[in-house]
Image (tube, rainbow, N blue to C red):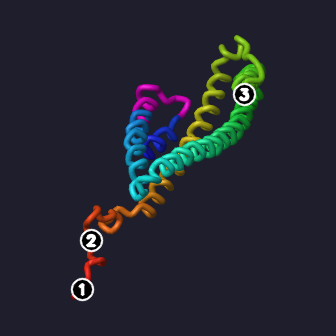
Amino acid sequence: MTGGMFWLSTISADSGYFSHLLPSLLVLAFGIGNIFVPLTTVAVARVEPNEAGLASALLHVGQQVGGSIGLSVLTTVFATASRSEGKHQGTILGGLVQAGKAPKSVLQHFAELSSQATGSTRVSAGALSDNTAVRAFHVVLAHGSSRGFLAAAIFALVAVVVTFGMISTGKDAVPPKEGEETAAAVPVA
């Protein structure tokens, strides 16, 4: 899962669906599919049978709350990175206009595309056909997405480290079966 997130963090405006996005999503899906069942098993492994429902409910509540908080943080990372890259692309486009390499309308079209992304305005046909403005807007979206995926990958990596540090899977971690005695419980004569 972490590998898929790191792979997605390398997305750019030139990334292709079949060459970049689909393979990274398959790696991510494989990782997610292989983590939830073991996570649930570990979370309820040492719980008394009469408290298994409560443990399962707490696990699911934790997943929902954690997912909500995580999504909020990642959305903030995306928005901040996009805003920063939007200013940078605006500066680049302004330089192209001043140098006479792009028409003045490119800045207006870029602003329209950026406003449309937040849902505040509808984009004009001129903005959609302005390849320079569209390209700059795609760079902004790709930059924000890559930073959001990078943050998610870092969170996932931290989770892996914490998991290996907190979950003990040694022989002592497995409770004895009913009727078995542990070495410490056997009286020494």
Packing grade of label 1 (10 A; few <14, some 14-19, many >=20) is few
Query: On the image, which quarter does residue 95 sit in?
Result: top right
Up/down of 64 relative to 163, above or below: above
Up/down of 165 relative to 156, above or below: below
Dot label at residue 188? 1
Q: Residue at x 74, y 28 (%)?
A: 99
Packing grade of label 3 (10 A; few <14, some 14-19, many >=20) is few
Which amino acid does the dot numbered 1 rest on?
Val
Q: Which image quarter is the C terminus in?
A: bottom left
Which amino acid does the dot numbered 2 rest on?
Glu
Evaluate whether residue 100 shows in this view.
Answer: no
Disc 1 versus disc 3: nearer the observer: 1
Q: Residue at x 68, y 23 (%)?
A: 133
Q: Secondary structure at mark 1?
A: loop
Evaluate whether residue 90 shows in this view.
Answer: yes
Inter-mark Cα distance, 1 to 3: 73 Å
Q: Secondary structure at mark 3?
A: loop
Q: Looking at the image, tell me whether mark 1 or mark 3 is earlier in sequence order.
A: 3
Up/down of 85 relative to 174, above or below: above
Dot label at residue 181? 2
